[in-house]
Image: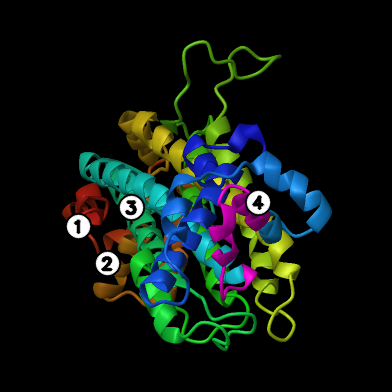
Amino acid sequence: MIDRYRTKEIAVIFDEEFKFDRWLFVERIVAEVEEQVGIIPGGLSKKLKKIKVSPVRIARIEKTTNHDVIAFLQAAREKLGSVGSWMHFGLTSYDLVDTAFILSIREALDVILHVTRKTMTVLKKLSVKYRNTPQMGRTHGVHAQPITFGYKAASWYEETKRAYERLEIAKKEMSYGKLSGAVGTYTMLSPAIERKVMKKLKLRPEPVSTQVLPRDRFAFLVAMLALYASAMERIATEIRNLSRTEIGEVLEPFTKGQKGSSAMPHKKNPITCERICGLARIVRSMLIPAYENICLWHERDITNSSAERIIVPDIFHLVHYMSKKTLWVLENFTVYPARMMKNIKEGYGVYASQNLMNKLVARGMDRTTAYTLVQTLSFKAVHDRRDLHDCAADDPRVRRFLNKRDLVRVFDLKWFLRNIT
């Protein structure tokens, strides 16, 4: 990931040194169990606890071996002495790599879940704060019927909550490891050994594996992260739209000293929200290699490996970066309730067209006639820049069915918002 979108919390987890520490940790837990049941002599697990391996040294060895796990094992054995011969006993490379990878992924998910909980808290507060703040609802970008800004925030909250729950499911989905060997058939180590190791690692044994863990689990993870990114994009897109000059109902934070344009000093552009939207496209693009990684040849090939070295760390960087930016925007953006009300009033009352039509039908007017009449009056109101209420009040066809008091009720803003909680 380029430095611009890296986050320190995710960078630590997917750092090479941290990865090799995880590998040592898994090897140590395996050694502990193997020592306990008498598969290997004692001593290795204690020594594994004390050593560290240098990524530089591993990289140097890998130039010769062209195999990163063998390079890692060789670098570790250089520090272990004779007992190092028992390291990795009975394992295949991906017993180690996939199981350790899962530990890192779970830790990265915890980082994402932490900031998502904060975002949910902020959205809940916004929904309460603005629950009685009228705002024009829009469909197709056109005035429809009134909502409240709190109701809009509540919809953001619910989608973020769903994303959070899916990520928790993804964490469960990514809580499996394996020690089942080269083709998944426990040729060297028994399922009982695998169960003991996984219990210590707080993982579950993969029910049926090949040389690797099944990649549909990883595809599910990427899909859940992509759905969360899309939820953030929806929030960011709405803020961008509501920030447009002709709407002007919200404004993302504009910090001291910030500049909006090299040419136009007046500009306050929603650049953070635009960035969130742009990065969501990159996150979704990672679905393609994640899904294609599911289908490996026979009991495995390594077409998934090169792709996962990129997409897994990068998707966590991007989603965490987007999460932090979304949270920052929601904590600091400006809401303009007066402008929201002004925009409602400047819609010339057409928000009540359905209610007006229904009231006419309820009083006995044919529905097609009522629809045509209200449509004509609505278009006239907008064209003449005159409130639909006044246009309806002046029309004898409306007055035959509705009196002045009826019309006041038809256009009562509170009536439209009565069921919003």
Q: Which mark is residue 359?
A: 2
In the image shown, does 169 or 209 lie closer to the viewer?
Answer: 209
User: In the shown orientation, is residue 86 left or right of residue 250?
Assistant: right
**Crowdedness near tag 1: few (<14), some (14–19) or many (≥20) residues, C-alpha within 10 Å:** few
In space, the residues marked 1 and 2 are separated at their CA atoms by: 9 Å
Q: Residue furthest front?
A: 82
> Is label 1 in contact with label 3 (beta carbons under 8 Å)?
no
* Span highlighted in magenta in the image: 72-93
The quadrant in which the C terminus is found is: bottom left
The answer to whether one can see residue 137 in this image is no
Q: Is residue 97 above or below residue 104?
A: below
Q: Nearer the viewer, mark 1 or mark 4?
A: 4
Disc nearer the start of the sequence (3/2): 3
Horizontal side of 358 relative to 333 (left or right) equals: left
Residue at 37 percent of width and 41 percent of height: 344
Question: Dot 1 corresponds to which residue?
Answer: 406
Per the model, the C-alpha gap separating discs 1 and 3 is 37 Å
**Residue at 41%, 54% in the rendered image:** 46
- Quote the CA–CA distance across marks 4 and 2: 49 Å
Q: Is residue 382 or residue 20 the one in the foreground?
A: 20
Give the image location of residue 186, x and y in percent: 54, 86
Q: Which mark is residue 157?
A: 3
Q: Amino acid at mark 3?
A: Tyr
Which residue has dot 4 on it?
282
Front-lying residue, 43 or 57: 43
Mark 1 touching mark 2, by CB under 8 A?
yes
- Residue 274 shows in this picture: yes
Question: Where is residue 302 shown, x and y percent of the image?
Answer: 74, 70
- Residue type at tag 2: Lys
Dots 3 and 2: beta carbons under 8 Å? no
Tag in front: 4 or 3: 4
The secondary element bearing badge 4 is classed as helix
